[in-house]
């Protein structure tokens, strides 16, 4: 089958997802326009060679709704022959875009596809789009809905992670992200966002705390104890019947940050790259999605990784570097424990705890960060994985060429 | 006679009085709705200015006709019935002239729904009046617009609480909620206020029929309601555990109804109503807690030939918790009570306990200060047996010891009148044995009250070998007189309730002995629909008591030369007792107990290490329910139970057997005896002979019959 190559990737910095965040005053389509124009300019890309733009967006409502990919393509001045589609696989949407784009290319149906995603969480908060899973009481009951944080706390309880374990992991995320930023390791990917007048809005990730400390983290209140007590714990315990009590250990400091941001990745076959004058950087070797138990919700990465490794014919030890999304500290810790992953190969430049998780874009960012680091270290194979709402997991394996 | 009498006054007010002929209460059905329809025809006449809707019964309207619902075969009938009711109510609120409900008695279920379709509701300010939507308690939901109008009147959350909890509101509470427009001190004022409301609102319209109407607090579309909707199923599920479809259906009807216009929302409610009404859970609940409960209360187990009697004067021996509870219940029912104990101080303390109960009832608005004082005045604490001379009935509630009980029996009988009945409130000691201390065993009976007496609605009447029909009837009449539900059983070890209840507790302990994780066991008990999980309940009952009862049984059986097979859970109970973990009273049993609550004792993991492979919840739930149902069937087979209805009602009211199964025997009938027998045999093969299906069930299965024939 045709190979799907990664030709380039880029992203906005991640801005704090609140009213005082650096990207709050930028519309989501503006973030995409910024990246699409930057991608075109970097390579003097003939955009008529691009078949489609596949974007993830988890809360596609308001100005972020109605297939924002198509709006962004046209707003960025790309060829109108380039199509655009928006999809949601919750937190995996950014990586799902990459996998769909790769599948389009590998099938031979398309030659050059842009993948990526966007989320302005400060302007369109999580849940703004409702959904049967959460709102419809019949469906909510049938699926045993609880907020993700309760699921994360349940994972920590079952795995026996202490608050100190989780906080230490959070501290590590900030330290590594701070070091990576200081060394300029993200500079190749980040496109600073300018406003309509050309004034700078945000040039670097906004939520990294180089001064983070265990003391400061230890002072944060658990985020899900109150809602857990209101009834969600009981729903989870009805399924996890050997757990007497959920220990609520996750808080704002050891869970992923709410941020605004966007990311893109240019994917194509050899012919498409040649026509556009591009050099391939990595091959997408395999991708996988799985469904997992929806109430605990966040245990999908382990089976997704096992599935993708089997498809790629690889074992855990073949993977040089891992990116496991830091939705909650317990998730990378559990996944690493399940698979026997050496923590020194995991999220080596920090993750979403430090830099935030712009839902629709994160998966694409993770894969791009992974590729940059493989190149920097002269390594070959990497795997990115995310836990996903509704009980799913996703994983993608890339190999440098 | 018409179901609704209609009179037009000179002031143009049409007064419609709901008064179903031949029924003690107004119930919603075709007759009542036809009557309301006629009232609306009268209201349509040009001289009519408004409609005043009230009732000729003690109640305003008690709700749906459950006897009729019990006959519904498929979903078409409940759907059509709901639609027909709603058509009349919709016409009532949209015809343009004011309609006011004057409520002087209970307005429940469909009765409250009729009132909600009026433009205003006024009620008598009487704490005894109940307003509410209790349908969910019988596995039903409002089908006459309740899930449509209540959210539009009070907001979604308040409406959900009323319908999901099914609790009554007093008029004062209903006024505070916004359910009522006003209260009146007496009936005359009530009617006057209603007329005044009509005069003041010549062109009344419901809020939801005014353009640009908005739900108070927002509809299902409002972003602000998302957190509530995300949480509501968890809150409801923590109680119902998904066992009662109506709980889901109420939420769905309110949610979807909050996205739709009034008429579409009404239709959707009828769909969910039909699904609820035809659910097996609803049939079980109505079958037992309505049909069989009514039959039991009316005396299906009472000797019919004996004339009804009343107790005017009651003696209670022993002023402890049970004695005081019984005294309180009797005094509330207008019976004079002698509360007797060894010392005057003990007797006074018992009376003080009843005062505490009465104060609590008054604080909750369940009785007036005058009623409290009157009840208290009826209780006379004493140490003097001679004062029992004119008692109609004496109940002993002394220490659970044969010698102590024999002594008070003799002391009381020495002064009791010829016709008086002596009753023992024993929960474990066979009545015929206790009656050996009696000089008049034909007038000796067991009246097994449950603790706490003021909350537990059941009394298990135990008929001893020599108890006469006359005595049984008098015991039965007394239990009805104090407003409790009597079931009648024959005298065997553990009677009915204690025996079957114990099988639930011990099955949980047996699982623990097998290496099932304790939390897994407890969750299975809750998911099965039991009010408390088995190990926690065993702690409440006390392990030492269970051990004592088992040892007593062993001794009795060996004396009788009968074999005794120890329950597989008993070794664990004995071991815990040996190390002082006696249960909740000791602060330590399967759990550690303190003021904060209970936590599983960590040492349990060493005593009974959980196996690496745990059985599925379904297996545990089946075991916990089948073991009870099978024991209940054995009680029926052995003649301990005299009727299936007593067995079902007793299991739900006595120890809270999963109500949506309709009781321990209906559990068998609902799945079919043949299915029960197959599953019970498989359980017996895996877990022991206690699951071997009772012969009476095997026979029913073979004959393609039901236990409740």
Image (tube, rainbow, N blue to C red):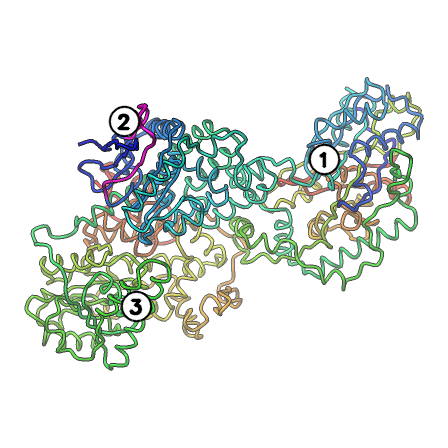
Report whether mark 1 lies on the same chain as mark 3: no
Q: Are marks 3 and 2 in contact (CB under 8 Å)?
A: no
Can you tell which mark lies on residue A93? 1
Q: Residues within 10 Å of mark 2 (few under 14, many from 20)?
A: some
Residue B160 place in picture, x, y as percent:
46, 43
Residue A188 position, x and y percent, is 91, 40
Residue B549 shows which numbered tag?
A: 3
Query: What is the quadrant of residue B461 in the picture?
Result: bottom left
Tell me where residue A310 sits by quadrant. Answer: top right
Closest to the camera, between mark 1 and mark 2, is 2
Residue interval drawn in magenta: B36-57
- Nearest the eye: B292 or A28: A28
Percent coordinates x, y for residue B495 in the rendering: 24, 60
Dots 1, 3 in contact, CB < 8 A: no
User: For the residue labelled by badge 1, is the local secondary structure a helix, a strand or a loop?
Assistant: helix
Residue A150 image label? none
């Amino acid at each position: 089958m045709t190979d799907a190559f990664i030709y380039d990737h880029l992203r906005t910095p991640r801005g704090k997802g609140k009213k005082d965040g650096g990207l709050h005053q930028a519309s989501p389509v503006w973030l995409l326009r910024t990246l699409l124009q930057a991608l075109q300019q970097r390579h003097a890309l003939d955009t008529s060679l691009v078949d489609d733009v596949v974007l993830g967006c988890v809360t596609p409502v308001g100005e972020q709704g109605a297939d924002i990919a198509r709006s962004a393509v046209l707003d960025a001045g790309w060829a109108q022959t380039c199509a655009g589609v928006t999809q949601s696989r919750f937190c995996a949407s950014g990586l799902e875009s990459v996998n769909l784009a790769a599948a389009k290319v590998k099938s031979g149906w398309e030659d050059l596809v842009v993948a990526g995603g966007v989320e302005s969480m400060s302007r369109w908060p999580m849940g703004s789009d409702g959904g049967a899973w959460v709102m419809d009481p019949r469906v909510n009951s049938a699926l045993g809905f609880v907020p993700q944080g309760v699921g994360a706390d349940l994972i920590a309880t079952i795995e026996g992670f202490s608050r100190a374990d989780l906080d230490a992991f959070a501290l590590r995320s900030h330290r590594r992200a701070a070091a990576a930023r200081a060394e300029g390791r993200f500079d190749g990917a980040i496109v600073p966002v300018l406003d309509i007048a050309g004034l700078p809005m945000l040039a670097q990730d906004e939520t990294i705390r180089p001064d983070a400390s265990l003391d400061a983290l230890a002072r944060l209140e658990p985020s899900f104890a109150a809602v857990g007590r209101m009834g969600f714990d009981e729903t989870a315990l009805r399924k996890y019947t050997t757990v007497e009590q959920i220990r609520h250990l996750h808080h704002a400091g050891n869970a992923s940050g709410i941020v605004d941001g966007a990311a893109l990745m240019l994917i194509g076959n050899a012919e498409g790259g040649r026509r556009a004058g591009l050099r391939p950087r990595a091959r997408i070797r395999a991708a996988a999605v799985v469904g997992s138990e929806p109430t605990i919700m966040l245990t999908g990465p382990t089976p997704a990784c096992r599935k993708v490794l089997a498809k790629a014919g690889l074992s855990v030890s073949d993977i040089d570097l891992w990116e496991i999304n830091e939705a909650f500290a317990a998730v990378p810790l559990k996944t690493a424990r399940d698979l026997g992953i050496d923590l020194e190969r995991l999220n080596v430049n920090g993750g979403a705890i430090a830099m935030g998780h712009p839902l629709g874009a994160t998966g694409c960012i993770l894969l791009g960060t992974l590729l940059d680091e493989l190149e920097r270290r002269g390594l070959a194979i990497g795997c990115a994985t995310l836990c996903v709402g509704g009980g799913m997991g996703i994983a993608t394996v890339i190999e440098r060429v | 006679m018409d179901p609704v009498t209609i009179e037009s006054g000179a002031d143009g007010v049409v007064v419609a009085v709901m008064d179903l002929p031949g029924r003690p209460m107004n119930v919603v059905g075709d007759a009542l709705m036809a009557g309301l329809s006629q009232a609306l025809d009268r209201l349509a006449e040009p001289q009519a200015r408004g409609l005043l809707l009230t009732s000729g019964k003690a109640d305003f309207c008690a709700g749906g006709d459950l006897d009729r619902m019990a006959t519904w075969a498929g979903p078409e009938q409940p759907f059509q019935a709901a639609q027909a009711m709603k058509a009349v109510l919709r016409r009532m609120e949209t015809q343009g002239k004011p309609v006011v409900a004057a409520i002087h008695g209970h307005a429940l279920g469909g009765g409250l729904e009729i009132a909600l379709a009026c433009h205003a509701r006024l009620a008598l300010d009487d704490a005894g009046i109940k307003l509410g939507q209790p349908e969910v308690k019988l596995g039903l939901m409002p089908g006459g617009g309740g899930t449509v109008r209540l959210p539009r009147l009070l907001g979604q959350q308040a409406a959900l609480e009323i319908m999901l909890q099914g609790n009554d509101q007093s008029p004062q509470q209903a006024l505070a909620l916004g359910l009522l427009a006003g209260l009146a001190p007496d009936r005359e004022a009530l009617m006057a206020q209603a007329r005044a409301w009509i005069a003041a609102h010549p062109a009344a319209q419901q809020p939801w029929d005014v353009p640009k109407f908005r739900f108070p607090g927002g509809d299902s579309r409002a972003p602000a309601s998302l957190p509530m909707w995300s949480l509501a199923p968890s809150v409801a599920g923590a109680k119902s555990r998904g066992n009662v479809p109506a709980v889901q259906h109420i939420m769905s009807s309110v949610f979807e109804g909050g996205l739709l216009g009034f008429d579409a929302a009404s239709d959707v409610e009828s769909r969910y109503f039909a699904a609820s009404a035809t659910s097996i859970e609803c049939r079980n609940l109505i079958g037992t807690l309505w049909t069989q409960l009514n039959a039991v209360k009316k005396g299906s187990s009472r000797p019919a030939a004996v004339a009804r009697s009343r107790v005017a004067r009651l003696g209670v021996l022993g002023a402890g918790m049970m004695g005081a509870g019984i005294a309180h219940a009797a005094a509330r029912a207008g019976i004079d009570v002698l509360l007797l104990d060894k010392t005057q101080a003990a007797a006074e303390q018992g009376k003080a306990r009843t005062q505490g109960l009465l104060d609590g009832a008054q604080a909750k608005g369940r009785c007036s200060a005058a009623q409290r004082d009157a009840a208290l005045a009826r209780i006379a604490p004493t140490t003097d047996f001679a004062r029992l001379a004119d008692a109609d009935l004496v109940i002993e509630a002394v220490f659970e010891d044969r010698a102590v009980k024999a002594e008070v029996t003799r002391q009381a009988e020495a002064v009791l009148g010829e016709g008086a009945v002596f009753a023992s409130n024993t929960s474990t000691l066979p009545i015929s044995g206790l009656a050996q201390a009696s000089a008049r065993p034909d007038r000796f009976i067991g009246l097994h009250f449950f603790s706490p007496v003021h909350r537990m609605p059941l009394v298990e009447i135990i008929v001893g070998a020599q108890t006469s029909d006359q005595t049984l009837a008098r015991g039965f009449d007394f239990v009805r007189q104090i407003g409790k539900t009597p079931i009648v059983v024959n005298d065997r070890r553990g009677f009915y309730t204690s025996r079957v209840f114990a099988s639930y507790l011990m099955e949980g302990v047996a699982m623990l002995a097998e290496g099932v994780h304790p939390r897994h066991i407890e969750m299975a008990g809750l998911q099965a629909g039991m009010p408390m999980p088995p190990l926690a309940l065993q702690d409440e009952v006390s392990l030492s008591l269970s051990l004592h009862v088992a040892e007593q049984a062993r001794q009795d059986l060996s004396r009788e030369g009968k074999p005794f097979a120890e329950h597989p859970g008993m070794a664990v109970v004995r071991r815990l007792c040996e190390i002082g973990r006696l249960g909740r009273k000791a602060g330590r049993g399967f759990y550690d107990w303190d003021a904060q609550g209970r936590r599983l004792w960590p040492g349990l993991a060493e005593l009974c290490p959980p196996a690496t492979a745990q059985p599925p919840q379904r297996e545990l739930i089946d075991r916990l329910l089948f073991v009870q149902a099978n024991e209940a069937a054995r009680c029926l087979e052995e003649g301990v139970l005299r009727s299936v209805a007593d067995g079902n009602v007793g299991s739900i009211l006595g120890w809270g057997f999963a109500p949506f199964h309709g009781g321990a025997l209906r559990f068998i009938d609902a799945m079919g005896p043949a299915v029960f027998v197959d599953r019970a045999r498989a359980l017996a093969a895996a877990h022991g002979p206690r699951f071997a299906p009772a012969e009476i069930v095997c026979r029913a299965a073979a004959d393609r019959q039901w236990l409740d024939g």
